[in-house]
Amino acid sequence: MNRVEGKIALVTGSARGIGRAVVERLAEEGAKLVISCDMGEATYEQTNVRHEILNVTDRAAVAALIAKIEAEFGRIDILVNNAGITKDALLVRMTEDQWDAVINVNLKGVFNMTQAVAPLMTKNKVGSIITLSSVVGLYGNVGQTNYAATKGGVITMTKTWAKELARKGAQIRANCVAPGFIETPMTADLPEKVIQGMKDKTPLGRMGKPEDIANAILFLASEESSFITGQVIAVTGGLVM
Ligand SMILES: NC(=O)c1ccc[n+]([C@@H]2O[C@H](COP(=O)([O-])OP(=O)(O)OC[C@H]3O[C@@H](n4cnc5c(N)ncnc54)[C@H](O)[C@@H]3O)[C@@H](O)[C@H]2O)c1
């Protein structure tokens, strides 16, 4: 299948987990090039993937990368804001460093990327921006004040972009995917009791796989979703309804 044939896509936080599955899925579905960006190294077998070392909090590095892509291709059709971290603690114990670190990557990193890519999409009057929220951004979670703030924040940023970037007839869409509990390195260290508790609360009775999220992102990246913008698709096995 070629659901994103010929597109130039950029995915952040893509050395592992959900981001890696997204890169592979977009590449399989005919993207001309998927630019995978992460602080860590990654290799891909697919010839239409290029990996770049990037810290999304580094505004100068983000600007330099986008300028390089613009010079080479003149466009970015798909941006997937996937890079994200957790630094959990109960409200009364959360340190300023824990708060700042999560806000910096999950909120400011998304702002940095989208602000750098948006002018390129605006110039071409087309694009799809997909940002990773979370069930936690929809209903909160004990021990995740910082993370919940960012995952709720990206939803309202997305709604703002859906309005702002579509002005003057531009077909630029912005949507979020809110995963439930997904089997990735991010959740690998959760205690078995917590994981079992989540499975018990999930109607489909299991954790999700990175591919479950990648498939929803692929849909939002493709023309199949061309009349969908400003939305949050929860991919949670029914944990949130
Ligand atoms: N796994 C889940 O259950 C789950 C649930 C809801 C939402 N999410 C969200 O999905 C996204 C991906 O999660 P995951 O589980 O695959 O995480 P992960 O920890 O497995 O992978 C995250 C990747 O982001 C990269 N990264 C971190 N900080 C970065 C930075 N400053 N610049 C560039 N890259 C950076 C890491 O190097 C890593 O490769 C995150 O935004 C996360 O909040 C995950």
Image (cartoon, grey):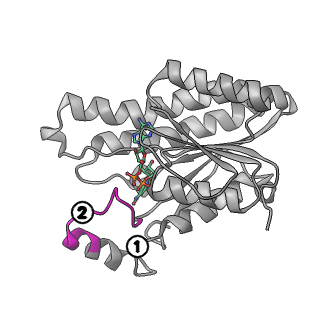
Image coordinates of residue 63 in percent, x first then y, are 59, 21
> How far, Cα to Cα, is label 1 from label 2?
12 Å
Question: Which residue is at a point 75% across and 24% down the rendered structure image?
Answer: 71
Tell me the magenta residue range: 182-195
Q: Which residue lies at the image location 85% right of the left edge and 27% below the top edge?
A: 168
- Above or below, 104 against 154 in this view is above
Q: Which residue is mark 2?
A: 190
In the rendered picture of this protein, how many numbered marks are placed on residues? 2
In the rendered view, does 96 fall on the left or right side of 172?
A: left
Image position of 235 with respect to 231: above or below: below
In the picture as drawn, the residue positioned furthest to the right comes out as 169
| Front residue (pair 205, 5) | 5
SS state under label 2: loop
Q: Position of residue 23 (x, y in %)?
A: 60, 54
Question: Which residue corresponds to mark 1?
Answer: 207
- The quarter of the picture where residue 188 lies is bottom left
